Image: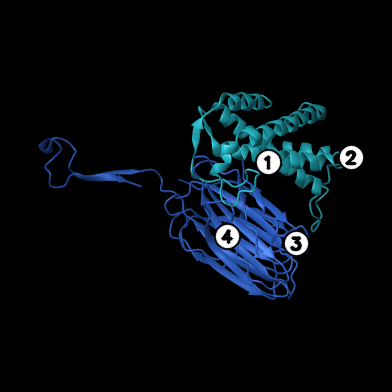
Chain colours: A blue, B cyan
Amino acid sequence: MALSFIGSAENNVADASVSTITLTLPAGIAENDVVYVAYVASSNGGADKNMAMTTTGYSELADLFANDADECNLGVYRKLMGATPDSTAETATVATGGVPKGAAVCHVWRGVDTTTPEDATTTTATAVNSAIPNSPSIITVTANAIVLSAVGSSQFDATVTAPAGYANQVDITGPDTRALAGIASKSIASPGTEDPAAWTDITDAATEAWCAATVAIRPAAAGGTLFVNLAGHGGLGSRGGLAGFGGGLAG
Amino acid sequence: MSAPFPYNAVSGVANDLAESEAENLVAQYIWLARWSDEMNKDVDLDYKKLAQFAFHCRKFRFWYDALQARIPLPLDAIEGAFLRRKMRWLTRLLMQQDLQDIYNAAGTIYDWIVANMQEARNYTTAQFDANFENQTDVPVKVAKPAAVATRVQQFRQLFN
């Protein structure tokens, strides 16, 4: 089953130590859709904040920290939607330490392998003296996987651009001063190494820091394959039917 | 003839705040339409849907109030946000009337849910903030009370 992009959402808060960020998810969301959230908190307090989600059911794929004059904290999360899907995704507040500006974005995908949503272990990278995030490489193993470049920066910048070849860009900066969160995606037809380029059009400064993760989404298997092992049984009639033969439904 | 020049076409210029508020208003509008439609059709009452519906009632009013506080009313931004989702009224006046009706109905039904459906809160997470914002993933369905069915049906009728 091919992966399809359902939509995205974005929001920010002026102080993530006192306010959560609520993302209103795309209204077309359905059971078994998967939500990926990138949540950034950034202050000049130099604190490694514990990033988390308030909405239940999210699995943490990354919790990163890079410390410069302005720090960057990035959390990346995933949730498989249940029978009654969530209409919102809410981040948790973070510890104080300066006044952390908050920014969060999400992608919603359909057709994800619900048993193993990621096609590879999420890879991560961080850096200081730069505001320009660059997601690390990842090795996909399934055809037509989707690779997400999920990034955070301490920089305040409302107009940024995803790496070349990446689509479905969603990004938001803090209400002021700091924090930038973004996600963009690329379909990888043939399994192998994908190394997203750096995001562009971001005002750079040596006082900034960034964090980035690369997530590979595994598509669900395309339908089931019926196999029946008849070898050595002399045909269907001799055993009174298919029951008892080695067989099954895969996929 | 001159083609429209986008007001935010210059790199580095942030989107207008009213446009952001209008986007949020439409996001709540869409969820109100979906949950009222689903709850109206459901045989049972899904507490999670009810709680999320209440949340979006509250947020719809929040963003509507934010837009109404702007002088002049940013009708371009509001209409534009709906048009981007292919939702169009014959006139702006009709759009304003419908949004005002939904605003009023959202306030009425939210207050009623808070006052009369407290049990829905039992199925929220520990961080529950009294605004039906954080929901458990455990599906909880009960027989739909007639009072809920009637109110949801009336709310659903606000939409096509």
Label 1 and label 3: CA atoms lie apart by: 24 Å
Circle 1 sits on which residue?
B27
B58 relative to B69 in the view: left or right: left
For discs 2 and 3, the disc positioned in front in the rendered view: 2
Disc 2 residue type (three-letter): Pro
Q: Residue at x 80, y 31 (%)?
A: B96
Marking on residue A157: 3
For discs 1 and 3, the disc positioned in front in the rendered view: 1
Q: Residue at x 61, y 48 (%)?
A: B128
Label 2 and label 4: CA atoms lie apart by: 40 Å
Disc 3 residue type (three-letter): Asp
Q: Earlier in the sequence, mark 1 or mark 2?
A: 1
Marking on residue A154: none
Label 2 in the same subunit as label 4: no
Disc 1 residue type (three-letter): Ala
Give the crowd class for mark 4: few <14, some 14-19, many >=20 residues within 10 Å: many
Label 1 in the same subunit as label 2: yes
Question: Foreground residue, B114 or B59?
Answer: B114
Circle 2 sits on which residue?
B72
Circle 4 sits on which residue?
A76
Residue A164's place in the image compared with A35, above or below, is: below
Question: Foreground residue, A127 or A241?
Answer: A127
Residue B17's place in the image compared with B32, above or below, is: below
- The chain under label 1 reads B
Q: Quadrant of the N terminus of chain A?
A: top left
Q: Position of residue A160 (x, y in %)?
A: 71, 60
